[in-house]
Amino acid sequence: MKLSEKKIQKKKEDIILSAVKIVNEKGYQKATMEEIAAELLMTKGSLYYYFKNKEDLIFQCHEMVLVQAIEELQQHINVKQSNEEKLREMIKTHIQYAIEKKEMFNMIIKPDQTFSEDQLNPILLKRNEYAGLFDQVILAGIKTAEFTIDEPKIARMILLGSMNWIQQWYNPFGSKTIEELQQIYADYMLKVLK
Amino acid sequence: MKLSEKKIQKKKEDIILSAVKIVNEKGYQKATMEEIAAELLMTKGSLYYYFKNKEDLIFQCHEMVLVQAIEELQQHINVKQSNEEKLREMIKTHIQYAIEKKEMFNMIIKPDQTFSEDQLNPILLKRNEYAGLFDQVILAGIKTAEFTIDEPKIARMILLGSMNWIQQWYNPFGSKTIEELQQIYADYMLKVLK
DNA sequence: TACTTTTTTGAACTAAGTTTAAAAATTAAA
DNA sequence: TTTAATTTTTAAACTTAGTTCAAAAAAGTA
C-alpha cells in the first residue's frame, strides 16, 4: 500500500519534470503529450493513468514551480535587514525567474490562457500568495517611512507587471546583462515607492 | 477587375471583423474557424479562399487593430503641449486599450504565443512603431528637462510592461474605475521618469 | 442562352488530445 | 514456484479543429 503509493508518486514527479522541461523549451501549446511521454520512454496513453488530462498535468507542473518560487522569495524576506534591501533582493529574484524560466513563468503569470475555470481558482490563490510577499515588504516599508505611497497594491502591481514584461524583450546577447537589469529595475521601482 | 477586387477586399474585411469579435470574446485558441465562418453564414472551408490559414487571418486582425491603436496614439502626440501632458494622455489611451480589448491586446503584446517565425517579424516591427511613439515623447521630455533619467528605453519598457499587466487583474466591478487607474498609473509612471 | 470564371461547399485528411479494451508486468497468495 | 489478482502500459480507435481539394453552385460575360 504505502510502497506502491510512493512509487506512483515518484512516477508522477518524473512526468511533471519531463513536462516542465518540454514546456520550458516550447511553451504549453507545442508541448505535446507524446513528447512528454517519449522523454520517459512511455507512450502518451500512459500519462492518462497518472493525470486526468493535459491541463491537469500542466497544472501540477505549475504548482511545483510556483511553490519553489515562493520558497525562494520567502528566504530573501527572512534574511535581509531594511525593507528596501529586502525588496531589492526580491526584485532581483523575480527578474531571474522571469528570464530563465520564461515559458513556465508565462503560464504562471497568464494562467487564463492555459487553464480553464475550475483550475484557475487555486492558481490565482497561489499567485496571490506570491504577490502577498511583496505586499508584506512594501507595507512594512511604509510603516518605517522607507516608502511613501498611497496605493501600495497598485504599486506592487506596477512592480510585478513591469518585471514580468522583461521576458518579452530580454535578449541574452543584448547590451545589458541580467545583473545590470536587476540593478536598474530595482532603482526605478524604488523611485515609484519613495 | 477593379470591382471584383473591391468585393474580395470587402469580404476579407468582413471576415477579419468577425474574427476580431470572436477572438476578443474567447482568445486565439478558442476562436475556431468554424465559428468565425458561421458568424458570416459561411462554412469554414470558404475562409481558406481568402486567407492562407488561421494564423494568416489572425495576423491580419492583428495588423488592423494595431494600426488603429497607433493612429490613435499619434493623435495625442500631435495635440497636447508639454511632454508630460502628452505622456499622460498616451498612458491613458494605452490603459483603455489594455482593458477594453483584452484578448486582442493579448495577441498584440504576446505575439510569440500565437504566431510563428515568419509572421513574427512584421509584427515586432509594428510593435516597435507603437513603442517608438512613447520613446519620442520620453526623449523629448529629457531634452526639455521635464524628465531626468539615464535609461529611457528601459523606462519605456517599465511603462508599457506595468500597463500591459493591468488586464491581468483588472475587474470592472473592482474598487477602482478606469479613470482612477489611468490617473494613478500616470502619476506613478512619471515618478519613474522624473 | 451558353460559356467562363469566381466562390462556396462538403467530404476527406491530419494532428493532437482523449478513451478504452486488452496485453504485459508486477505483486500477492496458495 | 505456480497461479491468481492487481497494477501499469500499450496500441488502436475516437474526437475535435485546422487544412485541402474536387466538384457544385453562383456570378459574370459574350
Image (cartoon, coloured by chain):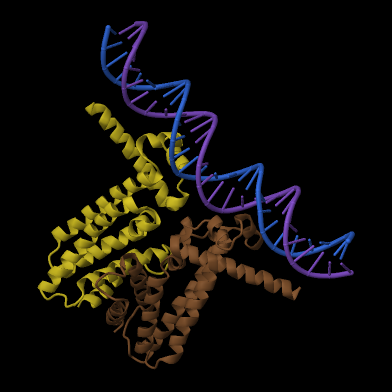
Chain colours: A yellow, B brown, C blue, D purple
How many numbered markers are drawn? Answer: 0
Q: Is residue A94 left or right of residue A167?
A: left
Q: In which quarter of the image is the C terminus of chain A?
A: bottom left
Q: In which quarter of the image is the N terminus of chain A?
A: top left
The answer to whether residue B100 is visible is yes
The answer to whether residue B60 is visible is no
Residue extending farthest to the bottom is: B81
In the rendered image, residue B150, in percent from the top left (x then y), is placed at 33, 80
In the rendered image, residue B8, in percent from the top left (x then y), is placed at 67, 69
Task: Name which quarter of the figure residue A182 lies in.
Answer: bottom left
In the rendered image, residue A26, in percent from the top left (x then y), is placed at 45, 51
In the rendered image, residue C29, in percent from the top left (x then y), is placed at 26, 12
B44 or C27, which is in the foreground?
B44
Name the residue located 40 percent from the left edge and 72 percent from the top edge. Answer: B100
Establish if A154 lies above or below B88.
Answer: above
Name the residue located 36 percent from the left edge and 66 percent from the top edge. Answer: A166
Task: Name which quarter of the figure residue A181 lies in.
Answer: bottom left
Task: Name which quarter of the figure residue D13 lies in.
Answer: top right
A61 or B58, which is in the foreground?
B58
